[in-house]
Image: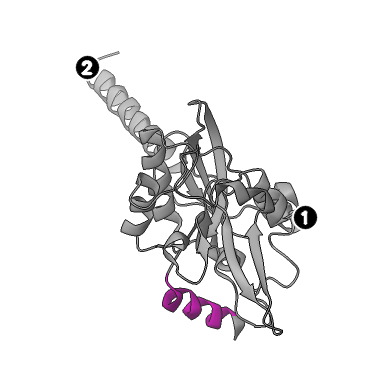
Amino acid sequence: MNDKEFLKNYIGIGILLVLSVFLTGCGKKNSNTGSGSSSKEYREGFSVSEISDDLFLRMKRGNTYKEDCIVPREDLRYLLVLHKDLEGNIHQGEMVVHKLIAEDVLEIFEKLYDAGYPIERMVLPDNYLADDEIMMRDNNSSSFNFRFISHTNKISKHGLGMAVDINTLYNPYHKIVTNEDGSTEEVIEPATGEPYLDRTREFDYKIEKDDLCYNLFIEKGFEWGGDWTDRKDYQHFELPTDITEEYSEKYTK
């Protein structure tokens, strides 16, 4: 082989190598993002992806995506996040939220994980057949679970996937309801959360005003149910009503 033939072959091989690398790069997907997601790179254990066919079937069988659900599947996102329990054990968590808050919530959970903020459990409500009481008793953290607000055609904030509940057993919902006859009734959800209504006590998994979890959600524009005066929902962070009603009305029309 003379010098010209060698140079010709060398250049040809180089071109093939460049094309191979280029084509490989074009076809490569981040394994963390899942089917149907963007090509954005996420750190190991954290990702945002669209709702895959398998996940959608799971949500329909588990009934978070009920037969009367009018929130488009395309507007929901599946989060994978790492979280640590009280003992520091690492768990792979999952959560479905509205696409409007997906990246913000992912960032919040990344910061909570890095700081070692304890979250005991985070699986989809479908694991509990979408039963809130059972799920909260198990101290599960979650978001999307479709439902309308009672006696209205407005979608609840959890029904939109625009509210997030954290460490639900130790941060219960509490309200005094006045009945038509003037009698009152105490509502505690979960019912087993009653011992944790005394917020002056120190106990594990408690969310407090100005703690890391509170501050991260507030910085992203969420409101905390622990700040409400007519009732308390210590587990609950939600987008303001003017934002959620806009989407609820859009989906209802």
Point out the stretch of residues depicted in magenta: 240-251
Under mark 2, the amino acid is: Asp
The residue identified by callout 2 is 3
Q: Where in the figure is residue 213, as x and y percent of width and height?
A: 39, 48
Q: Which one is in front, 203 or 251?
A: 203
| Depicted 44 relative to depicted 153: above or below | above
Residue 4 within the magenta-colored segment of the rendering: no
The residue identified by callout 1 is 61
Residue that sits furthest to the left in the current view: 3
Residue at 27% x, 18% y is 6
Under mark 1, the amino acid is: Arg
Mark 1 or mark 2: name the one nearer the start of the chain. 2
Q: Where in the figure is residue 129, as x and y percent of width and height?
A: 75, 53
Tell me the quarter of the image containing the N terminus: top left
Label 1, label 2: how many angstroms apart (C-alpha)?
A: 69 Å
| Depicted 46 relative to depicted 148: above or below | above
Residue 248 within the magenta-colored segment of the rendering: yes
Q: Which one is in front, 20 or 242?
A: 242
Asked whether residue 93 appears in the rendered view, the answer is yes
